[in-house]
């Protein structure tokens, strides 16, 4: 049972969708912390750029998830056992 749980965690952490989502969250947090420290006028640009990058990463994650063909027997967190 523990082996299945560990394998499931490894699959989730190694997923491209998980990595892209983590990058988007990290970038959003970074922009939220840095933007107020920028000179007047720049913080609006930083927020807009950060939002654009986060949306692109989110769209990439959605596209990868929807466009990657997976046979029905291989669906789920763990790959099928051979």
Image (cartoon, rainbow, N blue to C red):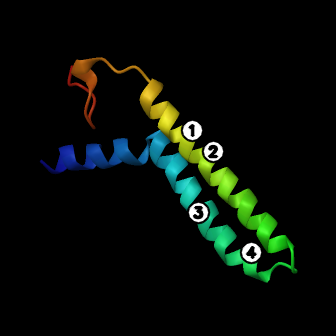
C-alpha span from label 1 to label 2:
6 Å
Q: In the image, 26: left or right of 38?
A: left
**Circle 2 Cα neighbour tier, 10 Å, few/some/many (<14 / 14–19 / ≥20):** some
Which is more N-terminal, label 4 or label 3? Answer: 3
Q: Is residue 58 above or below residue 66?
A: below
C-alpha span from label 1 to label 3:
16 Å
C-alpha span from label 4 to label 2:
19 Å
Q: How many marks?
A: 4
- Quick one: 66 or 71, which is closer to the camera? 66
- To which residue does mark 4 refer? 35
* Secondary structure state at the residue bearing disc 1: helix
**Image-quadrant location for residue 76:** top left
Q: In the image, 76: left or right of 52?
A: left
**Pointer 1 and pointer 2: residues touching (CB < 8 Å)?**
yes
Which is more N-terminal, label 4 or label 1? Answer: 4
- To which residue does mark 1 refer? 60
Rendered image: mark on residue 56:
2
Which is more N-terminal, label 2 or label 3? Answer: 3
* Secondary structure state at the residue bearing disc 2: helix
C-alpha span from label 1 to label 4:
25 Å
**Circle 4 Cα neighbour tier, 10 Å, few/some/many (<14 / 14–19 / ≥20):** some
Residue 60: x and y in percent read 57, 38
- To which residue does mark 3 refer? 26
């Amino acid at each position: 049972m523990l082996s299945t749980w560990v394998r499931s965690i490894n699959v989730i952490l190694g997923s491209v969708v998980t990595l892209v989502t983590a990058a988007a969250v990290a970038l959003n947090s970074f922009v939220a912390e840095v933007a107020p420290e920028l000179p007047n006028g720049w913080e609006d640009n930083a927020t807009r750029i950060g939002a654009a990058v986060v949306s692109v990463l989110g769209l990439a994650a959605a596209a990868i998830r929807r466009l990657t063909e997976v046979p029905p027997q291989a669906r789920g967190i763990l790959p099928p056992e051979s």
